[in-house]
Amino acid sequence: MPTPQDIWDAADLPARRLAGVALNPSSSPDVLLRLLADGPPAVRMVLCRDRVLPDTVVEAVLRHPDTRTRSFFARNPHVDPAQRARLVDDPEWLVRAHLAEAPKVPGGGRPAPLPDDVVVHMMLTYEGDLLGGPLYEQMSPGLYRGLATHPVAGVRRWGVGFWSGLPAVTRTALLADTDEEVRKRARAHLRSEDPAWVERELPARACHARLHMLMHQALSRTVVDSVLTAPVAERERHVIAGNPTLPHDVVVLLSADPDPAVREAVAHRPDLRADERRTLATDPDPRVRLALSVHPALSEQERAAVDYAIPADNGVYWWPVSPLPRDPHEVRRDADSAHPLLRRSAARDRFLPPDLVERLAADDDPGVRALLAHIHPDAPSALLLRVFVEHDGADRARLITRPNFPTTGLSVFADHDDPEVRALAARDPRTAPATVERLTRDTDPAVRAALARHPALPRARLTELLADEELAHPAAANPALDPEVIERLVSTGGAWA
């Protein structure tokens, strides 16, 4: 079966023109319906996957006889999720699979959640191979939070998987659940807290399962001593250093391990006592000191006394982001800290209150500003623009998709050295026609394509671009295209003399 890229690569120039018309905001519902009925695969793919659609077109897509056409709509991140959800019982496996697979949001990010009842229906009726991580991305925070206590047993089975983070009362209820499968899964998780069971089941050879058990499950003294004296594979001392069941005397031992990676893992342990914290705070390795400097037990005065430095290559990662809010007191404590990494931690909370959003948007740490811009749904317009201009990288494009990203005052970037910043001029309706035309001849292809869609593009240049091998597609998507031209393109199958 051809991939979406295969479909696009196989499209000829007329088909690419029609694909532009399919994206054109000025195309009427009638035009879109004709493209849906008669357009080649690339046109139907773009139409169903890459834009918001009028209700009449949505109805036609849902009834379309072509499986791939419906499957593209199932992955459309632009439409109301309730519209995609109407494909939940589609007769074709491929369509259901693509509905369960979260849509790829432009620039990355989390898609809008599907309705709760639809997600529950998928949990209860879909084949196991259709369900997995992407479905969690399409859950509302309320459903995600209540999986383990949901009234439907099939949903509680999913909730058992969050065993380590569940309150004791919820664990007890799951162990006594009326559903046998829920009880079975709960007991399986409970066994992982039994050191004797872990010792019996621990694989003797190096493998992912062994490392997982050493990292997360309850370890007997026999297992710990075997790792200390005769590890099966490299990094096993590093792995157990973060295990919450590690005896305190071993924590002390590993805090002086010759491997800095082991000491760094120890420094992250929340159960460190004051003596270990003081020792690690003066560790000769800067990575260990940095890890210790954000320990939750430190006062701000103690934190300031640690000689830490944040390396230039210390990445700022947007994902994963919890769909649930953190403890508000902890978030405020982190936001108030003088430590940039703790303020970055606060900036990662998408439920941050308005006063902290305002404060962190003006933070002097670029990482704090970048995280807030990428994660918080109400990140201010000025912050989004500042971060876009200051930070390059693949994730930068997602900032433009945010509702608060500005659309005015961007023409000032028309001569910027960075082509992605220059392309912002395409978003400004006040960019001068002469500037728009000039940028359609820019040295960067993405800039040329972006400005080919600007409605201020002079008509003569727009007509010229419809014959251009490279820019015919974005030119056909230009909302200033005359209705007569749109009609001509649709009637001739995309031909343009």
Image (spheres, rainbow, N blue to C red):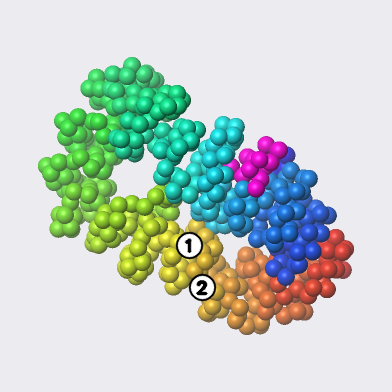
Q: Is 404 positioned to the left or the right of 54 in the image?
A: left
Distance from the alpha carbon under mark 1 to that under mark 2: 18 Å
Indicate the quadrant containing the C terminus: top left, top right, bottom left or bottom right.
bottom right
**Percent coordinates x, y for residue 413 in the rendering:** 53, 76
Under circle 1, the secondary element is: loop
Under circle 2, the secondary element is: loop
Indicate the quadrant containing the N terminus: top left, top right, bottom left or bottom right.
top right
Q: Find the magenta span and give its range.
A: 86-101
For this orientation, the residue located farthest to the left is 275
Badge 1 or badge 2: first in the primary sequence: 1
- Residue type at the position of mark 1: Asp
Residue at 75% across, 77% down? 461
In front of the other: 56 or 484: 56
Labelled disc at residue 392: 1
**Percent coordinates x, y for residue 197 in the rendering:** 32, 19
**Percent coordinates x, y for residue 178 in the rendering:** 42, 27
Q: Is 182 positioned to the left or the right of 72 in the image?
A: left
In front of the other: 198 or 262: 198
**Residue bearing mark 2:** 406
Q: Is residue 89 magenta?
A: yes
Residue at 60% across, 35% down? 126
